[in-house]
Amino acid sequence: MKTQIKICGLSTETTIDAAIEAGADYIGLVHFEKSPRHVSLERAQQLRGYAGDRIKTVLLLVNADPKLTGKVIADIKPDVLQFHGSETPDWVKLVRDKSGLEIWKAVGVRDRAGLAKTDRYVDAVDRLLFDAPARALPGGTGTSFDWSLLAGHQHQVDWGLAGGLDPDNVSDALTATHAPLVDVSSGVESAPGVKQVDRIAAFCQAVREFDASLR
């Protein structure tokens, strides 16, 4: 089975092309002003248009208010809306019901008790992204969590793995978790927010080589 790949935090047409050429399935655009990967709504709209139907576009929000959430949906028309803050299951379910969009929720995993609590989102989202616990900023920190926490977990909804992944460790991460989707951001950068075309290609190649090893 092919592992899906998301390259998150893109901000240029060149890196969108790189993700597409490398065989990624999703690109992520971050609209969160505190993030070094932040793109304005106008820029996100441009990048969404540039990507078109060549790859699926995920728009990431962090604790956005209803007005901004509605504007993002109307103006950018992402394929997927990803919540990466402390949004409640009721809120994300309401957005999914009202918008009809595919909804993802990133959740920080610290221990097994915390992992069990993520089940409250099962009926509210289309996919859970298991990430390292938030620090000063949610996501994009380059830190991973203990992948063994996912061993034996009974997933009740589609899911993916994020947090500290890079071209060198993604194969180990997949061996440990058998994640159906991997999400990388800082692991393909030379500096916060600065994506590297060669690292995007290397990450995708590492995933495809892992997939090939299972055949």
Image: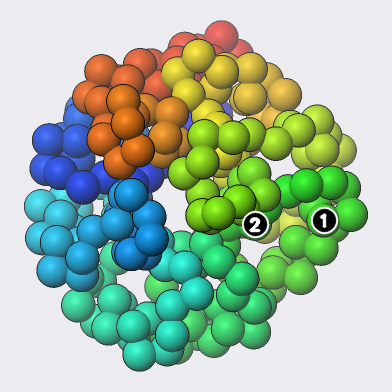
Left of 124 or right of it: where is 9? left
Q: Is residue 15 above or below residue 79?
A: above
Residue at 15 percent of width and 44 percent of height = 12
Circle on res. 114: 1
Quarter of the image with the N terminus is top right
Q: CA distance from mark 2 to mark 1?
A: 9 Å
Residue at 74 percent of width and 32 percent of height = 147
Q: Give the x, y percent position of residue 151.
A: 82, 34
User: Which of these two is toward me, 24 or 129?
Assistant: 129
Quarter of the image with the C terminus is top right
Tell me, yes or no, if residue 2 can be seen here. Answer: no
The residue to which callout 2 is attached is: 107
Residue 208 occupies quadrant: top left
Q: Give the x, y percent position of residue 49.
A: 12, 59
Q: Is residue 137 above or below residue 41?
A: above
Residue at 19 percent of width and 36 percent of height = 15
